[in-house]
Image (spheres, rainbow, N blue to C red):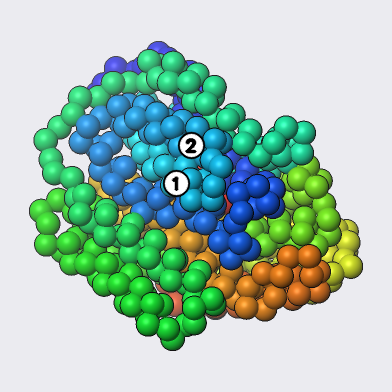
Amino acid sequence: MSAVNPRRWWALAVLAAAQFMVIMDTSIIGVALPEMQKDLGFSQGELQWVFNAYVIAFGGLLLLGGRLSDLLGARKIFTTGWVVLIAGSVVAAAAQTAWVEVVGRAVQGVGGALIAPSAMTLLMMLFAHDPKELGKAMALYGAAAPAGGTAGVFLGGVFTEWLSWPWIFIIYVPIGVATLAATKLLPAVGSRRGSVDVLGAAAVTAGLALAVFAIVRAPEVGWTSTGTVLQLAGAVALLVLFFVIQKTVREPLMPLGIWRVPRLGSANLAMTLLGAAWIPMWYFLNLYLQQVLGYGAFASGAALLPMTGLLMIFMTAITAKLMARVGAKPLIGGGLLVLAAGLLWLSAVEPTGTFVVDVLPASLVAALGMSLAYIPTMMTAMSGAPQEQAGLASGIVNTTYQVGSALGLAALTAVATSQGAGQLGNLPALTDGFSAAFIWAAVIAAVGGLITLLVMRSDKAAAAPQADAAPAARGERAGV
């Protein structure tokens, strides 16, 4: 047994801070979107690339980040990830055009894809000697995710309202430098021999990006246009190529045998649909608050705090206990259906609506559904995997959440734009577009809930023992 690291709790603080910042990077964007749109010239349909550029890079490269962490050493990849994240933040803050902003966000996503898996590897190395300490460490690490989401919503409003939107990226520079200075607290690990499936990583990332690009442009050029058909066909071909590569290379990013793990497939399907419903809701709710109700950035961020606060409370203190009592399947299926109900309620928004009537109650219902479903889905995806494949199972389910988020946001942006959301200043048209997006997000969530209840195998015993090991244990990210 390796010696116990005497500085492990200080090291955990560094890792939790990294988790906090990576999650905040997704939520801090929301309230700044309208200001970025005005300054950088994004169209209403193109604006989602500020979010999706990060998500595609992060989700597409997450498995590669884990593999590099195994081969080159977790501390080295963790440090490299922060250097990349800082560089992306500088580019995003300094951007004067839309395409430069998108590039900066993509670079940030690459940094996050290196940080997240290496941080989890380091945590396991520090605390694997004692299951009780490991459970406590994972609880603290997991709590940093919803805390980062909540802080991002608030700080995004503060920076955008009283400074300017570039500050939502500038803040990462001093924090990143401080984190790099503290990496000496982390255990050093030597490299080992092995190959890196760069081609597989490139195929899945390019396929996802091309699919999103095609869906975003389809309302403008036509769903049956030659360009759209060829782009979607190319995306499918790249994703098929990814699976062919995984089957043929000696050391794949995702050994296909992992899919024989019980309930991994159904859990990943639920996670995909959860991301495809939740992230568009959060995105369009920000736009409704500012572009229709006329809220400023700070007021918009403050308006979302009750929702993110409820998420934080349930994910860290309640959901795991419920899971131990009733099992995962009822919470996943029921949570998705509750999310669908909240989204359907949100679809009733009015051009002359108010926060208290049109937003607050519906957003709390949606947040309740998300908080019930997310942790059980994550744990279910990992519960059947053998110990040596737990990290891979975690990486896959995190990736499917990001993929669902990107494709869902692209598709529902297309729906909203076709229903009037592209007509800035026309409040009824904007509201109609946002309402249509909420309705279809509700359909996605409801389908996910019904499939889960009908298809997923009940297995309370497999998941319940993990309930005390921390709600958001292996790099979970709920989007806010």
Image position of 78 with respect to 96: above or below: above
Disc 2 residue type?
Val
Q: Where is mark 2, residue-wise?
A: 91
Q: Quadrant of residue 239?
A: bottom left
Residue 386 spot, x, y in % from top left: 28, 51
Image point 60% across, 76% down: which residue?
415
Of mark 1 and mark 2, the one earlier in the sequence is 2
Residue 459 visible in rendering: no
Q: Residues within 10 Å of mark 1 (few under 14, many from 20)?
A: some
Give the quarter of the figure containing the N terminus.
Answer: top left
Q: Where is mark 1, residue-wise?
A: 103
Question: Which of 187/92 is in front?
Answer: 92
Residue 221 spot, x, y in % from top left: 49, 78
Q: Judging from the image, what secondary structure is the residue with disc 1 in?
A: helix
Residue 33 spot, x, y in % from top left: 65, 51
Image point 32% across, 21% down: which residue?
187
Q: Judging from the image, what secondary structure is the residue with disc 2 in?
A: helix
Disc 1 residue type?
Val
Number of numbered labels in the structure image: 2
Question: Which of 170/388 is in front?
Answer: 170
Question: Which of 217/215 is in front?
Answer: 217
Whether tag 1 and tag 2 are in contact, CB under 8 A, the answer is yes
- State the separation of the CA atoms marked 1 and 2: 8 Å
Residue 297 spot, x, y in % from top left: 76, 45
- Residue 380 tag number: none
